[in-house]
Amino acid sequence: MQFSVHIPFVELLGFELQRFEGGEATIRFDPRPEHHNSFSVVHGGASMALLDVVMAHAARSVELSMGCVTIEMKTSFMRAAKGPLVAHGKLLERSATMAFTEGRIVDAEGKLCAHATGTFKFVPRLPVGKSTQALNTVRTD
């Protein structure tokens, strides 16, 4: 499954969207050595990016015509994350303009590595023009 919008940072990290519907999203991440910290496990920043993206996609899955931006996020790390990893995001509640979500990352054994909650604001898509075309490209393949 392809991401519905072009997100260069997500492509750089190699995230793979597996589910995107009904207030839920699932993303697979096979970390490479450049995603590791000095302890040779997934860097916390990579895990936080994964949680941010999966929660935003859970929110967006119920409002496809809108984008969403992160307002706040709280992350707790339970154990060192070693790939491959799967992140699950869930929309808990929404208003006309806000989405309240949670996300979790599990390792190949299904053990919880990190948990997050996040608040996102629904925003209109940017007007399409030369400088924003890539931001608004919807993939159909």
Image: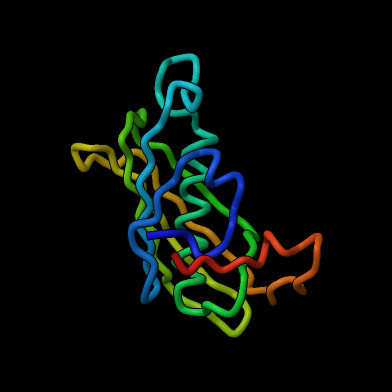
Is 108 situated left or right of 3 in this image? left
Please say if 10 is above or below 71. above
> Residue 104, how many percent across, how many down?
37, 50
Q: Quadrant of the C terminus?
A: bottom left
Residue at 80% across, 63% down: 130
Question: Image quarter for residue 135?
Answer: bottom right
Please say if 96 is above or below 133. below
Question: Image quarter for residue 26?
Answer: bottom left
> Residue 58, how many percent across, how many down?
44, 66
> Residue 79, how many percent across, how many down?
34, 31
Please say if 140 is above or below 70. below
**Front residue of this view, candidates 16 and 46:** 16
Q: Quadrant of the N terminus?
A: bottom left
Residue furthest to the bottom: 96
**Front residue of this view, candidates 92 and 13:** 13
> Residue 140, how many percent across, how many down?
47, 69
Q: Count numbered badges in the picture.
A: 0
Residue at 56% across, 68% down: 138
Is 18 situated left or right of 137 in this image? left
Residue furthest to the left: 109
Residue at 45% across, 73% down: 61
Please name the colour scheme applied to the rendered image: rainbow
Residue at 62% across, 70% down: 67
